[in-house]
Image (cartoon, rainbow, N blue to C red):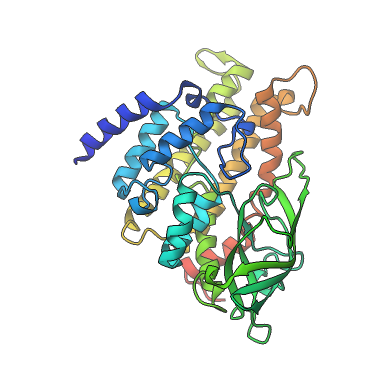
Amino acid sequence: MSLISFRQETREWLTNNCPESMLTPMPVDEYPGGGKRASYKNPDTQVWMKLCADKGFTVPIWPKQYGGAGLNAAEAQVLREEMSALNARTPLVGMGLSMIGPALLEYGTEQQKAEHLPKIAKGEIWWCQGYSEPNSGSDLASLQTKAEVDGDEYIINGQKVWTSGADQADWIFCLVRTDSQAPKHNGITFILFNMDQPGVSVKPIKLISGLSPFCETYFQGARALRKNVVGQVNDGWTVAKRLLQYERTMIGGGQGGSAGKSSLSEVAQHYIGITDGKLAQPQLRDEIIQHGMNDRCFGMTVRRNMEESSSTKAPSFVSSMFKLYGTEQNKSRSELLLKAMGLQMLGWEGEGFEQKELEATRAWLRTKANSIEGGTSEVQLNIIAKRVLGLPD
């Protein structure tokens, strides 16, 4: 099928199937994360998720046998463009799609792929990430959570922190130490296990935004099947590094720019007004234009990289560039919103504020973590210097 025919067919399908309420900006409480514990304030969220999952559009480039649509890079780009043209919401999000799913496609056994990938594609399982520990953040390889063999299982003891969504997660992909005598990078194993068991407890951490997406996670005699080791025992660092590249691409904005977000210009015009056909504040007008140009350039750069790497489908160390620049763009966007909305973006609760204004306040506060999560900006600069630019230590 030609791209022109594919575009027409895709446009018709989206137009005929996307519920009307899914053509509006996504509120925080309608987040389409899926999972066994998911509840849907808007029933259309689940309807849209299922329709897209049945079509393979939740993971369009994955092979069909794992729940994808088997699209090539050009077709996947057409799908993104047509969804964006309609302002259609993303039908499903989460670490299953952007992190552990791609890692399993690359490193998982056929049994692991068949067991987990179709459930991810359908939104049946919510995953969380067990990487950081209280004393192992930027120096992740110093982690101390231990796993000891017990027959066909591992017994796991230790603690993780900043475990996003752990209080809602069904499964975790986790780094554990399986050889305490080996050099720290060589004694780590990457393993999957169920969160719904007696040996796992979770405590949410309240953030400056008032939300609690991050958690402290404790393992006391938790169990994981040995068949759920991804890659090789004691070589989990290899899988972990690759997954971090997927994560950084996602955090930086996998499509580049402010895809799916409301227009800065429209918001500014609403709160500040227009004079002689232009935004009333010249300096802010210039800053918004510059931000939009940067967004456009970033999006084109991400797209070019996707096209150049379409044969491998795996990210490279360039993901650190996207993570660094994308997070700075996101933080800058919130600062520009603050300039435009003024006091209306400084509300916390009560009368005088619309819900979207309160959400914008919390989103602005949440961006303060962008330069920390997934590897700090300082870590990304080191990676770019060494791995991308080839500079000496």
**Does 248 appear above or below 241?**
above
Q: Horizontal placement of 41 versus 67: left or right? A: right
Judge whether 60 appears above or below 49 on screen.
below
- The residue nearer to you, when weighing 287 against 77, is 77
> How many marks on residues?
0
The image shows residue 94 at horizontal and vertical percentages of: 55, 47
In this view, the residue farthest toward the front is: 151
Q: Eyeballing the image, is 289 above or below 254? A: above
| Residue toward you, 335 or 20 | 20
- Viewer can see residue 63: no
Q: Where in the figure is residue 305, as x and y percent of width and height?
A: 38, 54
Extreme-top residue of the structure: 276
User: Is 249 positioned to the left or the right of 273 in the image?
Assistant: left
Quadrant of res 162: bottom right
Q: Can residue 48 be seen in this view?
A: yes
At a point 40% along the width and 33% down the height, the residue shown is: 83
Q: Position of residue 121 (x, y in %)?
A: 45, 47
Q: Where is residue 282 in the image (x, y as percent from the top left)?
A: 58, 25
Q: Residue at x 67, y 65 (%)?
A: 138
Farthest residue to the right: give it.
350
Relative placement, left or right, of 279 versus 130 is: left
Q: In which quarter of the image is the C terminus?
A: bottom right
Residue 274 higher or lower than 113, as above or below: above
**Residue farthest to the left?**
2
Name the quarter where the N terminus is drawn: top left
